[in-house]
Image (tube, rainbow, N blue to C red):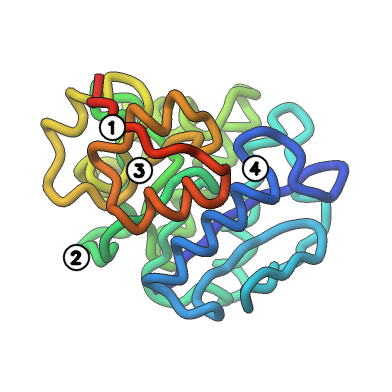
Amino acid sequence: MNNMIVYMHPEKRFADPNNTNEMVELQIDSSLDFWKPEEIMLITNFPYEYHGVKSYVLDSSFICDFSPGDCRIDIIIHLLENGILKGVTWSHDVDAFQMYPVLPNLEKDAGFTTYGWNDKWNTGSFFFKPSSLDIFRWIREKLFETRTNEEIALKMLTDSNYKNINTRYEIMNSTYNVGMRCTRTVVHNSEKPIRVAHFPAYNYGVFCKYKPILTSRLTKLISDKFNFDEKPISLS
């Protein structure tokens, strides 16, 4: 299984709040509890190395001109077309932190998570097999046709059941992607334990909100990285 994180920026550095050097270091430190360094595929358009994890450098031409954050679809297509990704791949954002083993029994070609409080797709964490290549090509076509983003493009495809796409994916439980909106409701409806917490860990207020569902290990990593004081605040 592959652990894939994509981040590209025109300035060739980690350059926005959810993707700072500190956030990437935190992501790697937490990931190394579950993965070997060589299993973590951090894809960037600039060289980077931290604790044995080296970035897989691709050209900046993959950056989407109308939606820079949506370069991952083209990159997934490139990696699948060139046979670089084998088996199941977990793709997730820098601020989506694993807390327990992520080993879904993926029976179909892909597994997507929703936001948990509505049925919109949340592509901050999803799973796919090499057999999903055509699905990502469809997403790319719709993305460039509508000039929106990957989540909206995927929703358009699934709402219309384009080429019978709805038989090709599974809806993953929100335990794989607990985000910031309606967190209490999403946690309540998720399988336990919560496997992936998706939030801006550098934000002290949001960190306090998430603390009740975080593992002690991740709590310590975040507190140490951002010099947060320990304050028991309940989930709201």
The Cα atoms of the two marked residues, 1 and 4, are separated by 26 Å
- Which of label 3 and label 1 is nearer to you? 1
Q: Are marks 1 and 4 in contact (CB under 8 Å)?
A: no
> Which residue is the site of mark 2?
105
* Residue named by callout 4: 19
Mark-to-mark CA distance, 3 and 2? 20 Å
Q: Amino acid at mark 3?
A: Ala
Amino acid on which the number 2 mark rests in the picture: Asn
Front disc: 1 or 4: 1
Front residue of this view, candidates 151 and 17: 17
**Image coords of residue 229 (percent x, y):** 45, 37
Q: Secondary structure at mark 3?
A: strand
Q: Amino acid at mark 1?
A: Pro
Q: Residue at x 47, y 46 (%)?
A: 223
Camera-near label (2 vs 1) is 1
| Image location (x, y in percent) of residue 236 | 25, 19
Task: Give the labeled residue for mark 1.
Answer: 232
Q: Earlier in the sequence, mark 2 or mark 1?
A: 2
Q: Quadrant of residue 56?
A: bottom right
Residue 200, above or below 217: above
Query: Which mark is first along the chain, 2 or 3?
Result: 2
- Element at label 4: loop
Marks 3 and 1, the one that precedes in the sequence: 3
**Marks 3 and 1, how far apart in space?**
18 Å
